[in-house]
Image (cartoon, helix red, strand yellow):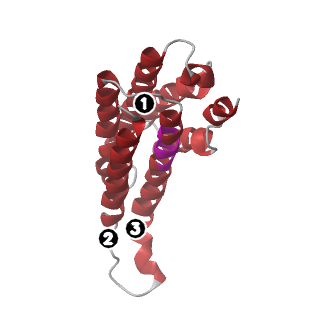
């Protein structure tokens, strides 16, 4: 199978995830700007999650462009990734509505950790199907960001019970690491 169907399906699911997140934003009661103040945690959690979804969409797109064919294990690994991404709206809403308290912030980290593991599994399935000398394998290289991110998520999960702000800063830090589009695949495809 070619990658276009997998990419189109994944794009559709990601679009739905973003739609669910934006629909969860409640309209404030009142016409003044002070009516927005109680919604600040909800909005901030939405922005962070929107950035994460954008990062996954961008990197997923690049990864599939370095993929020649799709196998059954790749399809299932992709579904595994989409499952964890689909939980982001729930974790985002719970965290924002509860002002970044410990259990919701920790669950948010668990969802991000599991999504990062699922992405790694998908990446490994693609490399396994295309060989050790595949474009994706060459592009990924040592993948220091991919190895560092789960460690930071684990730290953030535990930090949530010590300091909600340290936990949130770690989530933002990982997002910032990935915010600049990963050009490794683009460079490898151009060579």
Work out which quarter of the rendered image holds the C terminus and state it.
Answer: top right
Tag 3 residue = 39
Q: Mark 2 to mark 3: distance in Å?
A: 8 Å
Q: Residue at x 58, y 40 (%)?
A: 178
Mark 2 and mark 3 lie on one chain; the one further toward the N terminus is: 2
Read off the magenta span: 54-60
Which quadrant of the structure image shows residue 93? bottom left
Q: Nearer the viewer, residue 163 or 24?
A: 24
Tag 2 residue = 26
**Mark 3: secondary structure:** helix
Above or below residue 137? Residue 158 is below
Residue 99 seen by the camera:
yes
Image coordinates for residue 120, horizontal then vertical, percent: 44, 25
Q: Mark 3 to mark 1: distance in Å?
A: 31 Å
Tag 1 residue = 119
**Mark 1: secondary structure:** helix
Q: Residue at x 55, y 43 (%)?
A: 175
Residue 88 seen by the camera:
no
Instruction: For label 3, count other residues whose C-alpha is less than 10 Å away and answer few (under 14), some (14-19) or many (20+).
Output: some
């Amino acid at each position: 199978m070619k990658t276009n169907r997998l990419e189109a399906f994944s794009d559709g699911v990601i679009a739905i995830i973003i739609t669910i997140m934006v629909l969860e934003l409640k309209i404030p009661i009142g016409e003044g700007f002070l009516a927005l103040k109680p919604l600040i945690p909800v909005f901030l959690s939405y922005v962070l999650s929107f950035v994460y979804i954008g990062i996954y969409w961008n990197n997923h797109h690049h990864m599939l462009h370095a993929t020649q064919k799709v196998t059954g294990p790749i399809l299932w690994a992709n579904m595994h990734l989409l499952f964890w991404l689909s939980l982001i709206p729930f974790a985002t809403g719970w965290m924002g509505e509860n002002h970044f308290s410990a259990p919701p912030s920790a669950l948010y980290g668990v969802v991000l950790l599991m999504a990062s593991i699922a992405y790694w599994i998908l990446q490994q399935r693609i490399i396994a199907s295309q060989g050790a000398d595949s474009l994706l394998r060459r592009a990924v290289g040592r993948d220091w960001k991919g190895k560092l991110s789960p460690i930071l998520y684990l730290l953030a999960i535990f930090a949530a019970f010590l300091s909600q702000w340290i936990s949130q800063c770690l989530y933002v830090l990982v997002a910032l690491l990935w915010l600049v589009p990963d050009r490794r695949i683009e460079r490898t495809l151009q060579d």
